[in-house]
């Protein structure tokens, strides 16, 4: 038989369900509710164990086991109830006279005939006549008894003692009432079963004696000598003597005792000198006997054994084995008790309530103390897998406790028992909303009254008048602005300009690096009131405008079509100076050969806006590689893919005239390799190299990408977790 079927079949929930079915079926057949008797469910569980043992080793379905249990138990309970009813009927028939037996037997034999359809009217008439006759007989009997009671009685017949019931009659009556009262009380507490309907022999029924003393016990107690234990009622002899006296005689005796009491001293009752030798020995034995009970002696022996065991030194391994054995013994005991016939209802209600109170108090005392721990995390959108995935700076996912194969944004820790999650603030870049038809218009995120941050993993935080705010985790409003200037005002206009001889500003913040600090409007947080969140696996961040749309549809990631060196600065100044947005670079300090230095030109697959990629932005490149045997190939690959990234130094000129680019270009110019020397006076020539020894033509088109680091979002969160307080267990050493 399948072990899972055994466990499921013997489960308390399964047995309780089918026991209810058996109880209802038995009640239908016998009109007796077996739920009133606690012993029935124990018998039901025993029969379940028998069926499970018989079917052991057989692949019997659970439904078949349950059906067998229901059928066998229903038939068994019904048979036992019918047998008990038959025994009760036989007992009643034996106590009745023979005529009643014959009449009762005739009535049973004629039961079908009396209630046949043909005799139904006759039966009704006969029953009416019988009822009238019975009422007439009862009335005559009552009138005869009343006439007898009204007859005058002589004074000799009036004897009060005869009218009072004797002791035996009173004891018999009290004994019967006491039996019934105690039996009902025990049945109500679940300590015994109802013996009227259960199959318990008469010799096993509890017989509760009356609380009285018979003559033998009274004679035995009254014969106690001096120095022996006295009975509960030490005036038993006086009670026996006074039983046959009337009230006048009892009053005379009390008066004589009162008069004689003044003549004798209380010390004369036990005058030790007047006692004989036997009485003296009894008194001495009484005073010398300590009467140490067996319970006290057993407790003393147990305490001494425990003290002796504590003095013994035990090894750690032995202590571990003893502890493990005791735990296993307790588990076995609990397991056996769970499927046995033990009935908790057999416990006294007072003891049951005390045990429940003790259990609740124990559970409260054993609850560990907790502390609220605050954890701060910061999330940067540049750490997402921007090279492979289609996530954007305003919509990406963060993984907690990510493995080594995870390429996206991740937090090394995983937080458990989380009580609340809230965002402290968000740092958002100066990101413009572009209108392709007219690039003169500059609209950034400050144009919106607020921004909506949605975290799908946390719901029911915010409510609003539309679906966008219903999904919001929090509402972000502008707080502060931090920015820096890329080009000094002296170089924007004047004779020494590096922009153009007649500079034009395409938008107001063209030469400023700006970030905005946003804070939650109502300090929103997701709080887990009833139960802490077990753990947080991932968190998706979606930042939208107040209308629920994306802030910017243009990407901050561009695919690189090619990377090359330009011609030297001198040739660019002579031939292509009008093709650049800004004046060409002034070169390295005190470098007289600046005209021979070159830009590195990065051509992208798609055009980008000069409002997104601007002078002074940091860009980061991944995936650039070359094939060939150039001696500077590896140095150049490492330089392009370096972690610190590159700064945009120049771009193609923005031409707003009709038919030209309108601010969308595809070329970015960065500095070539080269560092200044340790005195910061000139170029370290060993660090500069151009394309002479580089196989630039061996680059596979569109295999590398770049990202603008100045367009990334930053989110600062506070996560509160609940952890156990171990300050009561561990004490610091450096107090």
Image (cartoon, rainbow, N blue to C red):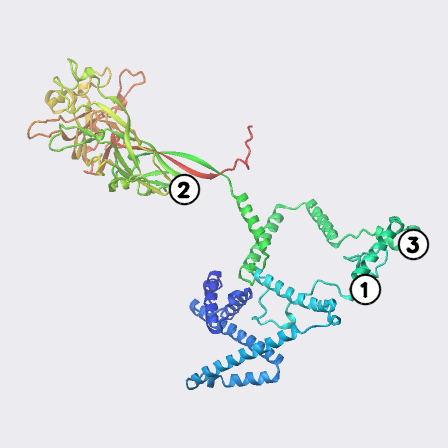
Task: Report the residue marked by disc 1.
Answer: 219
- Crowding near the residue tagged with mark 3, few <14, some 14–19, many ≥20 C-alpha atoms within 10 Å: few
Q: Above or below — where is 175 with respect to 540?
A: below
Residue 641 in the image: x percent, y percent?
Answer: 27, 32
As drawn, the label of residue 529 is: 2
**Residue 346 visible in the snapshot:** yes
Chain-order first, disc 3 or disc 1: 1
Q: Above or below — where is 49 with respect to 438?
A: below
Chain-order first, disc 1 or disc 2: 1
Name the element at disc 3.
loop
**Left or right, 505 with reference to 325:** left
Chain-order first, disc 2 or disc 3: 3
Residue 649 in the image: x percent, y percent?
Answer: 20, 24
Of 456 and 566, the residue lying toward us: 456
Q: Above or below — where is 55 with respect to 281?
A: below
In three-dimensional space, the C-alpha distance between marks 3 and 1, rounded to whole angstroms, equals 23 Å
Task: Report the residue marked by disc 3.
Answer: 275
As drawn, the label of residue 530 is: none
Q: Above or below — where is 650 with respect to 142?
A: above
**Left or right, 646 with reference to 3:** left
Of 595 and 367, the residue lying toward us: 367
Which of label 2 and label 3 is nearer to you?
3
**Left or right, 222 with reference to 684:** right
Of 286 and 44, the residue lying toward us: 286
Residue 17 in the image: x percent, y percent?
Answer: 45, 63
Q: Residue at x 55, y 75 (%)?
A: 85
In three-dimensional space, the C-alpha distance between marks 1 and 2, rounded to whole angstroms, equals 76 Å
The image quarter in which residue 570 lies = top left
Name the element at disc 2.
loop
In three-dimensional space, the C-alpha distance between marks 2 and 3, rounded to whole angstroms, equals 85 Å
């Amino acid at each position: 038989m399948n072990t899972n079927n055994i466990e499921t079949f013997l489960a308390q929930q399964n047995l309780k369900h089918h026991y209810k079915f058996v109880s209802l079926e038995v009640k239908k057949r016998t009109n007796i509710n077996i739920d009133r008797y606690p012993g029935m469910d124990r018998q039901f569980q025993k029969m379940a164990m028998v069926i499970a043992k018989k079917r052991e080793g057989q692949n019997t379905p659970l439904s078949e086991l349950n059906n067998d249990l229901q059928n066998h138990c229903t038939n068994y309970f019904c048979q036992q109830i019918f047998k008990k009813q038959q025994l009760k009927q036989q007992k009643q028939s034996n106590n009745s006279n023979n005529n009643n037996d014959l009449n009762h037997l005739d009535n049973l034999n004629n039961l079908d005939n009396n209630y046949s359809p043909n005799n139904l009217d006759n039966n009704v008439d006969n029953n009416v006549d019988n009822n009238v006759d019975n009422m007439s007989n009862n009335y005559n009997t009552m009138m005869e008894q009343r006439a007898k009671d009204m007859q005058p009685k002589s004074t000799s017949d009036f004897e009060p003692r005869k009218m009072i019931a004797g002791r035996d009659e009173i004891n018999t009556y009290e004994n019967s009432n006491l039996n019934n009262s105690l039996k009902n009380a025990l049945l109500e507490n679940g300590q015994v079963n109802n013996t009227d309907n259960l199959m318990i022999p008469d010799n096993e029924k509890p017989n509760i004696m009356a609380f009285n003393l018979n003559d033998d016990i009274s004679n035995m107690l009254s014969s106690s000598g001096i120095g022996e234990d006295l009975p509960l009622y030490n005036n038993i002899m006086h009670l026996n003597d006074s039983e046959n006296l009337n009230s006048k005689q009892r009053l005379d005796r009390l008066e004589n005792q009162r008069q004689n009491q003044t003549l004798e001293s209380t010390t004369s009752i036990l005058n030790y000198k007047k006692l004989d030798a036997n009485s003296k020995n009894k008194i001495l034995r009484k005073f010398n006997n300590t009467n140490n009970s067996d319970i006290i002696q057993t407790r003393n022996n147990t305490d001494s054994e425990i003290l002796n065991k504590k003095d013994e030194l035990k090894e750690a391994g032995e202590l571990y084995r003893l502890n493990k054995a005791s735990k296993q013994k307790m588990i076995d005991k609990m397991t056996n008790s769970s499927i046995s016939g033990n009935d908790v209802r057999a416990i006294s209600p007072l003891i049951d309530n005390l045990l429940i109170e003790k259990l609740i108090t124990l559970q409260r005392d054993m609850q560990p103390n907790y502390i609220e721990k605050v954890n701060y995390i910061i999330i940067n959108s540049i750490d997402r897998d921007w090279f492979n995935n289609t996530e954007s700076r305003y919509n990406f996912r963060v993984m907690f406790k990510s493995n080594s194969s995870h390429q996206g944004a991740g937090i090394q820790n995983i937080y458990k028992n989380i009580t609340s999650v809230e965002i402290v603030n968000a740092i958002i870049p100066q990101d413009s909303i572009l209108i392709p038809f007219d690039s003169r218009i500059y609209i950034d995120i400050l144009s919106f009254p607020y921004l909506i941050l949605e975290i799908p993993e946390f719901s029911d935080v915010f409510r609003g008048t539309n679906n966008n705010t219903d999904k919001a985790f929090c509402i972000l409003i502008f707080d502060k602005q931090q920015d820096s200037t890329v080009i000094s005002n002296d170089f924007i206009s004047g004779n020494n300009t590096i922009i153009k001889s007649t500079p034009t500003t395409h938008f107001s913040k063209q030469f400023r690096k700006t970030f905005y600090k946003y804070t939650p409007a109502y300090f929103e947080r997701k709080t887990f009131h009833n139960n802490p969140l077990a753990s947080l696996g991932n968190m998706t961040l979606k930042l939208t405008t107040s209308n629920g749309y994306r802030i910017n549809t243009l990407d901050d990631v561009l695919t690189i079509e090619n990377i090359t060196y330009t011609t030297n600065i001198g040739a660019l100044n002579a031939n292509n100076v009008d093709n650049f947005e800004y004046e060409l670079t002034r070169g390295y300090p005190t470098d007289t050969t600046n005209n021979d230095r070159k830009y590195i030109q990065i051509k992208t697959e798609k055009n980008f806006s000069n409002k997104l990629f601007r002078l002074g932005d940091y860009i980061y490149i991944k995936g650039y590689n070359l094939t060939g045997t150039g001696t500077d190939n590896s140095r150049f690959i490492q330089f392009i893919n370096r972690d610190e990234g590159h700064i945009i130094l120049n771009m193609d000129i923005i031409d707003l005239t009709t038919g030209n680019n309108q601010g969308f270009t595809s070329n970015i110019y960065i500095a070539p390799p080269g560092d200044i020397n340790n005195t910061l006076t000139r170029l370290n020539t060993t660090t500069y190299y151009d394309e002479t020894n580089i196989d630039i033509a061996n680059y596979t088109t569109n295999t590398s990408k770049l990202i603008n680091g100045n367009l990334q979002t930053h989110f600062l969160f506070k996560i509160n977790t609940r952890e156990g307080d171990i300050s009561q267990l561990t004490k610091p050493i450096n107090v």
